[in-house]
Amino acid sequence: MKKFWISLGVAAALMLNGCGGGEKKEEKKAEAPAAAPAAAPVDDANAATVTGKVAFSGAKPTAKTISMEATPACARAHSTPQKSEEAVVNDNGTLRYTFVWVKAGLPDRQWPAASNTVALDQSGCMYRPHMLGVRAGQDIEVTNSDPTNHNIHPLPKVNREWNESQPPKGDKKIKQFAREEVMIPVKCNVHPWMKSYIGVVNHPFFAVTGEDGAFTLKGLPPGEYTIEAWHEKYGAMEQKVKVEAKESKAVDFEFKG
Amino acid sequence: MTDPEKDPVVHSSLSRHLVIWSTLLVLSLVWALADEIYFMRPWKRYQARFVRLYSAFLKKEKPAGAEVEQKIKATSEYQRLDREMKAAESAVMAKVKAIDDEVNLTLVPRILALNEKFQESRAEIVALTYKIETASGEAAKNSIRADIEKIKQRAVTVNLPKADGTEEKVEYQYARMEAGLDAWKTQKAKRLQERVDLLKPATELRAKRDQYLSDRMAEASTDVLNGLENKVRSFDIRIRQIHVRDVDLVDRCESCHLGAREPVVLTRASMGGEGMFTSHPNRELLKIHDPEKFGCSPCHGGNGIATSSEEKGHGRHKYWLWPMHYRENFEAGCQQCHYREVVTEMADRLNEGREIFRNRGCRGCHRYEGYDREKDELDGVYQQIRQHESQKAEWERESGFSIAKADKTKDNSEAQRLYALAENLKVRSSGLDARIEQLDMRSKNLLREIKKVGPNLKEVRMKLRKEWLPVWIENPNHWRAGTKMPTFRLDKDEVRAIAAFVWQSGVTGKLAPQAKGDPEKGKESFETRGCMACHSMGEGGQKQGGTFAANLSRVGEKVNYDYLVRWVHNPRERTLPYDPIEKRDLSEEDYKKAGVPFVFDVEHSQSPIGGHELVVENMTPMPSLRLTTEEARNIASYLMTRTRDESYASADFLEDPKLKPRGLFLVKNYGCAACHEIAGLEEEQRIGTELTREGSKPIERLDFALLGHKAEKEGWYTHKGFFEHKLKDPAVYDEGKEKPNKLERLKMPNFNLGKEEIDAVATFLLGSVEPNIPARYHYAPSDQRQDIVEGWWIVRKYNCMGCHRVRVGQNTLFEVLPRYQDPDWKEQRPPSLVGEGARVDPVWLMRFLNNPSLSEKDQDRNGVRQYLKVRMPTFHFSDGELRKLVRFFEALSSQAQPYIAQKLDPLSEQERSMARALFSSEGAPCLKCHATGDPNRDKRATAPNFLFAKERLKPGWTKRWMLDPARMAPGTAMPSGLFAKQGDRWVFAGPTPASFEGYKKDHADLLVRYMFQFTPEELNRLRASAGAGAGR
């Protein structure tokens, strides 16, 4: 009997002691982060297309003449005075230099990278082209074809700002913008009239209207999208469009003067 | 015989009691042990958990890091560097091996062998030499000398090892041994140096390769991670404490916060959601305040010794006086050592709290050491003057005594000594004159430096619409949301009395009637001249602009146009000067009596009665923008349009003299003179309690009034709780109190602070403690950093940061004003002043700050950046402020003081024409933007006239700027990439004029030397050649 009590006591003591050493089980392990969406090719067979025109209504703006007298080398490049490209209305009543892109609605995935480089030339002390669109990370090749010095100064809000000098016929510069941003104004501090706009987009669905004021966004997966048209003077407008597989739909914009 | 059954020892067993008691004993022992080992030591559990989480983290991190490392190692660039390194290494390997063999197999063993025998002989000679020195008698000495000679001549056989392992026996004499040893040692050193030289390219390449890897790895390398894993594997569960012996500080915080100083970044997410184990969020701060020296609790608060529970360790216990600061107040810890500063790096919330305290007028009622800078300094200056004067008198007296004594003394030399003493005392006292003169000037300065938080109420009659005044006094925040002026608890009668007193105590003066201006132009001026760096416009969500000064959305409802024009033109202009000795404003009459013309301004600041300094300016920090009267009219006209359509009741009672005495009483009672200049109350004392040590006032002395129990129940019976409730509603501690006399109520008005502002002020007050660490830890630098501490007070006082970036990472108003987001307007932003001290010549800076137009004739301009619409105003800084500002900028850039301009190599004629040609060439854009002083050209200029570089800039900075301006000022209009590195010199990146052919020197240097050796003749030559260039 005595032994029993004693051994009970000892056992209890041991047990209690043992308990003390125990530890709580580890909490749930952190889950592995979701894998990044793979770069799958666009399904061409089912791709939809959005086309359209950017029309202009109201009084046609008269383009201002740019005075290049501060830099005679620039003035000499033009036999007729250079007009400002801020607002250019085509003969067919459409608006040139409008950036059209899919602003929202695309699936969260990576699009195949663009392989070509986009050119931005400084010629006759004007940026050529006046407006361009690139993919995020795509190479932009900047050249100076003028006999005078330029500096290229993009003024982004999201991307990193830079400002580099480029001597006459100097080496080409290869530049990229890492993040989506519509639009990045580009200016030359030496020639204050020089201005260009670069639209940086994460996907390949964008266009800049040209002489016919039309645009085509090809290869879209079926879905509902917000299309934005952006113009440096007349602002931006949006439209929603829903496209089925292989469907082609028209979306027209109209800016008022 | 007794019956054993009856024997209590036998028949009643005690084992049961024994078991029960021993069990209890064991249990209590177990409990005691468990408590001791386990429950009272929660950190043991935490440490075990840390080890688990940390090793899991490292395990996960390693492959990711390794993958990155692998990828970098696989890049062609790394491979190339690796190959080059290996090639360089193998190219010299044979030679290196030959050297190693020679050194290790031949030279070293031979040196050792020979050295042994040599040392033996030398020891003998040294011993004998000592004997010579101690021997007596020349004969004995000579005999020892002969012994030494014998040893020297003795032939010693040395077993010299050979490279092949065999030995050869060589016989040596002492002298040969010494020479041989030297020769081998020299040889060895030479060969080893050869080895280093041979391996140098390989070593450099290896460093380059490793650098390439570490430059590209943001995370810790595999090596670091392996090291950490080893550390975790052998982790030892024990108390981890910092002991700072000289301050008797023991902090055991890291017994639980184990990740705080780990070399990898541990976030809550990476440590299984455990906030306890995260890294310290600011490593830079830890670098400055090394925990081994500062501990944790001096900054964070809490009880660093306690380890038995989280609550106790954090000091959140009713018996611990210094609870750990909460997240929203943690910068309070900075204040106890950094109390001399108004701006402390990396403590933005604390800075905001200080700024509210300073700029919202808290310091008007509550004394806070260091916040009455001008007043305190002025008192000090007066005291010093008195001291010096009495010292001077004493010396003069002594000198007289000395002479008198000398005249009478008999001894000539004693007379000479006394005369000399008298002279010396005179010279010394003349030195005091210089010191007194300086102090006197300083006292005049200081009188000018004192500014008030609110406007001068002496001018209300000229400035304001009568009807507006009572509406404003009743509830300023209602009329203008977010205004600096707080809301007092006043009833209608009190409002009437105060308004009437203020109105009737105002001066009447003449105001020039002003023609109307153009409000459209005025709006443009208002938005572009820089007004909005301090003032805001628009209400609610429309509000834009700074918060340093008033919102002007409704200013048209309250002001008199003529006064407003005068104010916009020069806000410092006063109607009458104030005489601090007479304690009243002087009138034209006073000047007339003294026969002095009635003119008072910064140049005419002496009293016609007595000649002492007068207050000749309004005590506002608002500067003069040097606008023309016309532009001032335009702006005023625009401001007059800023009204809401609201009607005001007539306020004729303002003229009722019966109200005045009660008004005066109330104005004194509520301490209005703390922020405003009021006639008759210029020398009023403070009415609030001093707050310098408020954070360490014993909690019982904070008057929670009837809310004490409620506060305890709700858990805010703390300093933090007291401050927050008081700031939110200053009347809160009147709750439930019976105060029939309204004047007994708490007087503090409501500043209508938002949550963030309350947090900021509470942080400031919580840090306002009796420091419990020794004074040597306080931030009181005696070097240049002292100038920085001083300078910030002035920068804050005049809101320089509204327009300028003064420190890295700081934003100005121009970064947010919508107009200045436009690409073309971006270049209209005021210049950044980061690095200003390295940029400009301090003498020039002083001149510029004194008169930013840099011209006596044409004040309506910026002296440097004439193309900027925004105007650098004239602040009418005192000499003392100018000095402090200049020293501040110099110190921020660690410039040696006083400044001595760097000597530049003289420019040869040829170099001069080369530089000129480059400047004006088509390939170089310099003159397209930079002004040259030619008005025709300068119309288009968008950058400063660098031909003034000589007097304005420092050459070293100028070169660094030209090479890469974006590095110093991101977003600047000046492009980078104008020069390219060629070898160790910079050459112009574009086409250079023909004269540059064969020029071997640095092009950037050439241009700097050209600019800094510029002459007026050269200016003409440059203009001519620029003209010719432009005509091409």
Image (cartoon, rainbow, N blue to C red):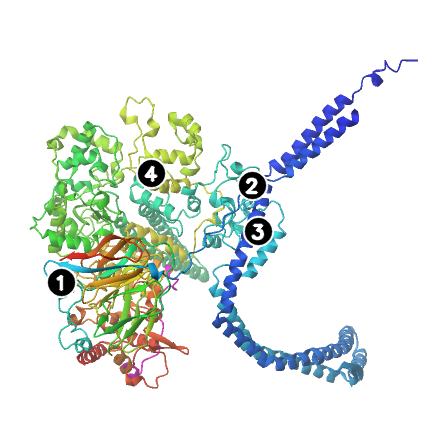
Foreground of the two, B1003 or B592:
B1003
Of marks 4 and 1, the one in the foreground: 1
- Mark 2 nearby-residue class (10 Å; few <14, some 14–19, many ≥20): some
* Residue A155 in sight: no
- State the CA–CA distance, disc 2 to disc 4: 36 Å
Q: Which mark is residue A190?
A: none
Residue B749 location in percent, x, y? 28, 34
Q: Nearer the viewer, mark 3 or mark 1?
A: 1
Same chain under badges 2 and 1? The reply is no
Report the quarter where the C terminus of chain B lies: bottom left
Tell me, yes or no, whether dots 3 and 2 are on the same chain: yes
Which residue does the image show at 9% across and 52% down from the upper left? B517
Of badges 3 and 2, the one in the foreground is: 3
From the image, tell me which residue sits under label 3: B55
At mark 1, the secondary structure is loop
Query: Which of the chains bears the disc numbered 2?
Result: B
Residue on which disc 2 sits: B305
**Mark 1, other Cα within 10 Å: few <14 / some 14–19 / many ≥20:** some
Q: Chain of mark 3?
A: B
* Label 4 secondary element: loop
The three-letter code of the residue at mark 3 reads: Ser
Comes first in the chain, label 3 or label 4:
3
State which chain disc 1 sits on: A
Instruction: Report the residue at 66% width, 32% height from top.
Output: B32
Residue A93's disc number: 1
Question: In terms of secondary structure, what is the magenta stretch mainly?
Answer: loop
Reading the chain from its start, which is encountered first: label 2 or label 4? 2
Q: Give the labeled residue for mark 4.
A: B366
Looking at the rendering, the stretch of residues picked out in magenta corresponds to B892-912
Q: Position of residue B402 (x, y in %)?
A: 40, 55
Tell me if B753 is positioned left or right of B252 in this view. left
